[in-house]
Image: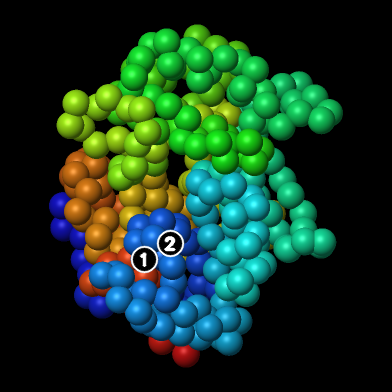
Amino acid sequence: MPVPYLDEHQVARGLLATATLMYSDLDGTLVARGGGVLSDASGAPSTVVAEAIVALKRAGLHVVPVSGRERAQLFELCRLLGWDSYIAEAGGVIVHGLMPNETIAYNNGEWPASSITDGDTPFQIIERSGAFEALLAAFPGRIEQYSSSDMARESTHLLRGCVSAAEAQAVLDALDPPIDFLDNGIVRTTSTLVCGGYPAHAYHLVPRGVSKTQSLRLDLELRSMTCADAIAIGDSVTDIAMADTVALLALVDNAFESPAVITELERHTPGNLVRLRGSRGEGWAELATAWLGARS
C-alpha cells in the first residue's frame, strides 16, 4: 500500500497548478475534534486552518464542502467561512450560492423522474418505503436513527449501528424505489446500540447511485468544468473514491489510522492519491499551502 506523501509525489505540483476548486470533507478532515477550525489536530488553540482558509479566498480559489450534514448546517458553515456552495447529505443535495440567491438541486441518482412527485423530497420517499423499519427488524438492537435532526434532512436518512453493509443492502434491495446503504465510517457516540464491543458506524440511506463521487461528477458538469479543474481531500473509505473524479486526491494523515482505509488501499490505490503529513485541519492547511505554491 505505497501512498506517496504530497511533497514526494512527482507530478502533484503540476496537477495542483491547474486546479481552481477543492472538494473538502469536513469531519475528520477540515475540523478538529468537536467541530472547530480554531484548533490543531490535538485540540489546542490554533489559527493555522483559519489562515489557510483566508489565503485560499484571497487567491480566488474555491472550496466546496462535501458532507453528510444537512443543508442548514452547511449553509451556516459556508456563511461563516466565506464559501458560496456546498454538497450536503453525502451527495444528495447540491447547492450553488447562498440564501437568498441559492440554487438547490436534489441528486436522485438512478431514480427515474417518475419516482419524484411535486412536493416530495427523496427523504420522504425513503421514509415511506419502510427502509428503516425493515433494517430495524433485520438487525434488532444493532441499528438506530442517528438523531432527531433527521427531521431537517431532505434527501438521505442518517443512521448509526454495527451491521454488515452487504447484509443491510440485501434488505434494502427488496424495496422500491431502489435505495443504497452507504457506510460513512466510525462514530464514537451511540444511544441504544448493542454492538458487543465492535465500533459503531454512521450510515446513509440514499437514492440508488448517489455517492460523493457521483455528486462531484454532477457538480463539475453543472459548473462546465472537468476533473483537471478540481482537487479533493478527505479521511475515509468513501472519500477515496473521489480520486476518480478529480485531478488529485489527498488523505489527511489520520485517515491511515482506519483499518477500513488500509484495507481499501491494499485493494486499490489510485495513482493520483497522496498522503499528507498533517492530521485533520493541519493536513488540510498543508494541502492549501501546496496548492497556493503550485498556482504561483
In the image as oriented, which residue stretches furthest toward the bottom? 296
Residue 96 x/y as whole percent: 70, 59
Q: Are marks 1 and 2 in contact (CB under 8 Å)?
A: yes
Q: Which three-letter amino acid code belongs to the residue tagged 1?
A: Ala
Q: Nearer the viewer, residue 231 or 104?
A: 104
Placement of 196 over or under 68, stated as above or below: above
Crowding at label 2, few (<14), some or many (≥20) Cα neighbours within 10 Å? few
Q: Which three-letter amino acid code belongs to the residue tagged 2?
A: Gly
Residue 273 x/y as whole percent: 31, 60
Q: Which mark is residue 35?
A: 2
Crowding at label 1, few (<14), some or many (≥20) Cα neighbours within 10 Å? many
Residue at the spot of label 1: 32
Is residue 165 visible to us here? no
Placement of 117 over or under 84, stated as above or below: above
Q: Nearer the viewer, residue 193 or 267?
A: 193
Q: Which quadrant of the view contains residue 43? A: bottom left
Residue at 19 percent of width and 44 percent of height: 259
